[in-house]
Amino acid sequence: MSPEIFSESAGGLAGLPVHLIRKMIKSWVCVQRAVGVRAACEEMKTTVLRLLQQPPAGPLSPSAGKHDGLHILNSTVKALKDGQVVAVPTDTIYGLACLAQNSEAIKRVYNIKGRNGNKPLAICVGEIQDIYKYCKVVVKEELLEDLLPGPVTLVLERSETLNADLNPFTKLVGVRIPDHPFMRRLCQVCDEPLALTSANVSTQASTVAVHEFEDLWPSLSVVVDGGPIGDQSRLGSTVVDLSVPGRYQIIRSGCAFSATVAALEKKYGLLEDSSS
């Protein structure tokens, strides 16, 4: 299968209101879905969208930037709304994402990764306020704002709004706001949480470049190539359980362990919960 390669700029969307982008994408998706009906029985093609940074010589023209960035969002949002799985860059490693409220898409993620069905998926949202919709928060909002957006996954008790088929074996869920402009805008435009996990076959190493998970491409609708992930650590986010008032428990050290623990203990006075 030969992926269709597009070279696109990420710039130019920052100045557009989210509600306007949603309206533009909704119109585009309606047209594309009508076309998609005719191709429903054809083999799925993987589209690779190359997310480029603004050139150092100066920004692109506003019209070009908006068109290019919107094209990438169009393709990714359409794939997600159609129940497909996409690959996306984050601030730590590459991830596989689908709509968290779509039970069939969640099954696809587990099948693609060969993931144990008893291992949970995290959710990704675009704003601090979204966390309150899908989780029961027992810490100060200031604490959330100190840690997010950033390379931290907060484990909280889930709310009834979150899809019951997502991690049905636990009342908890991990929630992320990656410090990555494309990921934040994607969540904002989708206007619902994404289920998120690392872009690799289970038991294999995390990936920091799209070529490292090429074996998964045939199962994905869109691969957003954001280039090599910065620190190359492959550690993933620091995962901390904040579901118990006044306490925290580190589930995975990740790449922000020291800074996270320092904030929780020194600034907010939380005590480590060492119970298993």
Image (spheres, grey):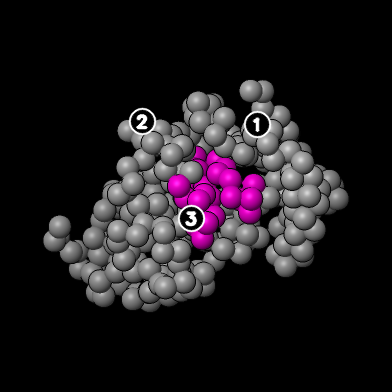
Mark 1: which amino acid?
Answer: Glu
Find residue 129 and report its horizontal and vertical position in percent.
Answer: 52, 72
Could you tell which of marks 3 and 2 lies nearer the N-terminus?
3
Which disc number belongs to residue 103? 3
Task: Assign a secondary structure to mark 3.
Answer: helix
Find residue 64 and report its horizontal and vertical position in percent.
Answer: 84, 46
- Give the CA distance from mark 3 to mark 1: 22 Å
Q: Residue at x 62, y 39 (%)?
A: 222
Find residue 174 and report its horizontal and vertical position in percent.
Answer: 38, 59
Q: Residue at x 51, y 31 (%)?
A: 216
Could you tell which of marks 3 and 1 lies nearer the N-terminus?
1
- Give the CA distance from mark 3 to mark 2: 25 Å
Q: Quadrant of residue 2?
A: top right
- Disc 3 crowd rating (10 Å Cα; few below 14, some 14-19, many 20+) is some
In the rendered image, residue 126 lying in the magenta stretch gets the answer no
Judging by the rendered image, the residue that carries numbered circle 1 is: 43
Judging by the rendered image, the residue that carries numbered circle 2 is: 204
Could you tell which of marks 1 and 2 lies nearer the N-terminus?
1
- Give the CA distance from mark 1 to mark 2: 27 Å
- Disc 1 crowd rating (10 Å Cα; few below 14, some 14-19, many 20+) is few
Viewer-side label of 3, 2:
3
What range is drawn magenta here? 79-107
Mark 3: which amino acid?
Answer: Ser
Report the front residue among 69 and 34.
34
Q: Residue at x 68, y 36 (%)?
A: 41
Find residue 145 and report its horizontal and vertical position in percent.
Answer: 46, 68
Q: Is residue 53 left or right of residue 212?
A: right
In the rendered image, residue 95 lying in the magenta stretch gets the answer yes
